[in-house]
Image (spheres, rainbow, N blue to C red):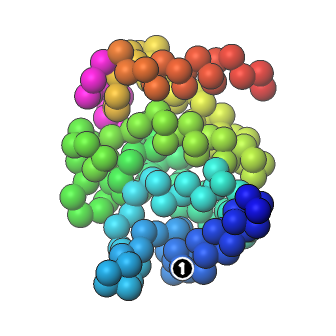
């Protein structure tokens, strides 16, 4: 029953949340019965769950590599939690742009599962570098890597240990 429920959920996510024009999954407002046009890094989380097919995964990776999310930009710390060119972006405001290690960890795993090893390694290195250079903070500025939020944040420490202990 769990596998059947997972299959039905994946079908529903593909049907209702995929935005063909933008090449990502989006949130859905059940009350207004419409997709939300707000773009943030959790839109890529279906990669972790193995939901998109190869073509959709490719489009999602291409989106992550744009200047909006900076996965291939050496001048940015990926992945900002919010589209850096989107309305309301802030590099330090809670969930409006800072880099969160837990989101990067999920994206790293999803990218690796789809064979995007170079991109997954970039996120792995980002997790390690942020912790090494700024500490085990809650979240980080995507432009200068400075630490924000609570310090000594347990999930940041745990995820850093996970990627350090994970054999490649």
Q: Is residue 145 magenta?
A: yes
The N terminus sits in image quarter: bottom right
In terms of depth relative to the viewer, which is nearer, 14 or 104?
Answer: 14
Q: Main secondary structure of the magenta part?
A: loop
Residue stretch in magenta: 141-151
Q: Position of residue 83 (x, y in %)?
A: 36, 57
Which residue occupies the foreground of this view, 103 or 125?
Answer: 103
Q: Is residue 104 above or below residue 62?
A: above
Q: Is residue 115 magenta?
A: no
Residue 23 in percent (x, y) is at 55, 72
For the point 26% across and 28% down, which residue is it?
A: 149
Counting from the top left corner in percent of width and height, residue 17 is at 52, 74
Residue 65 visible to an observer of this rendering: yes
- Above or below, 52 relative to 132: below
Give the residue at x 54% y 79%.
16
At which x and y percent is residue 79?
46, 44
> In the picture shown, does residue 70 fall above or below 24?
above
Q: Quadrant of the C terminus?
A: top right
């Amino acid at each position: 029953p769990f596998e059947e429920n997972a299959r039905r959920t994946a079908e529903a996510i593909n049907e209702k949340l995929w935005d063909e024009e933008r090449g990502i999954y989006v949130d859905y407002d059940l009350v207004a019965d419409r997709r939300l046009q707000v773009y943030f890094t959790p839109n890529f989380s279906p990669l972790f769950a193995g939901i998109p097919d190869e073509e959709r995964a490719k489009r999602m990776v291409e989106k992550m590599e744009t200047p909006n999310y900076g996965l291939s930009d050496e001048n940015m710390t990926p992945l900002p939690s919010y589209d850096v060119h989107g309305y309301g972006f802030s590099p330090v405001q809670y969930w409006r742009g800072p880099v969160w290690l837990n989101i990067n960890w999920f994206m790293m795993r999803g990218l690796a599962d789809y064979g995007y090893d170079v991109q997954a390694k970039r996120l792995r290195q980002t997790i390690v570098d942020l912790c090494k250079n700024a500490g085990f903070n809650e979240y980080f500025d995507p432009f200068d890597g400075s630490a924000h939020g609570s310090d000594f944040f347990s999930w940041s420490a745990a995820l850093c240990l996970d990627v350090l202990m994970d054999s490649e």
